[in-house]
Amino acid sequence: MRYAMIMAGGAGTRLWPLSRRDKPKQLLRFITRPGDDRERSLLELASHRLDGLIDPERRYVCTAEAYREPIRELLPEMKDAQILGEPAARDTVNAVGLAAAVLAKQDKDAIFAVLTSDHVIEPAAEFRSRMDLGFRLVENDDRRFVTFGIKPTFPATGFGYVERGTPVRDVRGGGKTAVDGTKDHCHQVARFVEKPDRPRAEVYVQSGDFFWNAGMFVWKATTFLEALERFKPESHAGLMKIQAAWGTRKAKAVLEEVYPTLPKISVDYAIMEPAAKAAAAADKGRFQVCMVQMDLSWIDVGSWPSFAQTVPSDKAGNRAAGAGTVVSHASRNTLVYASKGHTVALLGVDDLVVVQTPDATLVMPRARAEELKALHGLLDERLT
């Protein structure tokens, strides 16, 4: 049966001062989309993108235990058991492994998608079509690990890339959401490349064979655990202890004891890259790594400049968000977020980001947004 797990951890420090420790970016209602006047959180958008593909009772969220109640408020249709609360952050391979262990215990045939909670992806119908294709790839052959590649629109140096290899043909199944012409969308993965420099990124984009690594996956839970045992046995051993206790009175105690001891590493480094190398080597056959192309709008809302892409601009490129008032004159390419009851006025400035909240105001050149993490480390803890 099909399931989905949304990863909703992370601090969102590059969206300070709006994103804070007790309410990080994925839980903030600050995104508006055309045709919808309500501000929504990235987590809500991630869950609602699954409507018509995965029933609400088969959706899970993996997050910090401290965010359990805020998530219940954002997603009231989600039962408590569907929130997998991490007692400590141990990177993505363990978040995915926890979901795999829980799902495999209740359904040995569980196939699940791993999704992120910090993206704006449109159109939703196209997203569901490509996600359905990923599920069908695994349903046809449970040795497959499926990743999703976003067609790049510029030579980004902050994203990982996936190089497509041989086309995968004749994917069976599918209903309303099925994609036609699967040979144009499904490929074996030739290799993964982490955050290239600018010259290499330009070559990748021009080649047409490289795609941004979206950080989304589909796989069978038991196959993922098999790969984890092979490539990261320390994590597998700990997660098997957690699985054995899951659903018993000891579950919480075992999770709190074992989970913080698991080695921190990403799912890309721990599983996807070694599985892709193994598939290309002499021991090919047990695991296959495939990519589904997603030729759609994909915004990784990880910084203020990327958030700006979700906000309409005026003729001068100025963008205003929030419930406050923004007035600008003789200014260009600015982003202002103002809180309710506050007015921000700009005169004769270009390429600035201004974020005003009741207790903190950020002013920075747009081009230096990546340095916000360094500034965040200098702040009083009460403001973080």
Image (tube, grey):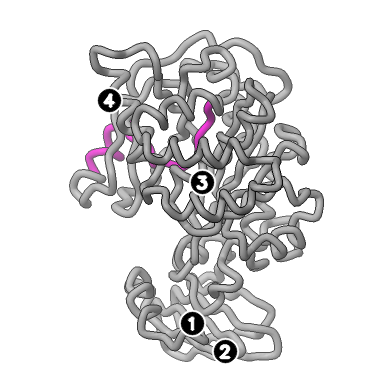
Task: Please name which of the two marks, 1 or 3, marks the residue nearer to the observer.
Answer: 3
Residues at marks 2 and 3, CA–CA distance in whole angstroms: 41 Å
Dot 4 amino acid type: Lys
- Label 3: how many Cα within 10 Å (few below 14, some 14–19, many 20+): many
Residues at marks 2 and 1, CA–CA distance in whole angstroms: 8 Å
Dot 3 amino acid type: Ala
Location of residue 226 in the rendering, given as x and y in whole percent from the top left corner: 45, 25
Residue at the outermost right position:
77
* First along the sequence among labels 4 and 3: 3
Q: Is residue 75 left or right of residue 376?
A: right
Identity of the residue drawn at 60% across and 71% down: 23
Circle 4 residue: 277
Vertical comparison of 114 with 380: above or below: above
Q: Nearer the viewer, residue 102 or 39?
A: 102
Residues at marks 1 and 3, CA–CA distance in whole angstroms: 34 Å
Residues at marks 2 and 4, CA–CA distance in whole angstroms: 53 Å
Q: Is residue 68 left or right of residue 268?
A: right
* First along the sequence among labels 1 and 4: 4
Within the image, what quadrant is residue 256 found in? bottom right
Circle 1 residue: 354
Task: Please name which of the two marks, 2 or 4, marks the residue nearer to the observer.
Answer: 4
Circle 3 residue: 95
Q: Nearer the viewer, residue 214 or 36?
A: 214
* First along the sequence among labels 2 and 1: 2
Task: Please name which of the two marks, 1 or 4, marks the residue nearer to the observer.
Answer: 4
Give the extent of the magenta segment: 202-219
Residues at marks 4 and 3, CA–CA distance in whole angstroms: 23 Å
Q: Tell me the SS state at disc 1.
A: strand
- Label 4: how many Cα within 10 Å (few below 14, some 14–19, many 20+): some
Vertical comparison of 382 with 132: above or below: below
Q: Is residue 300 magenta?
A: no
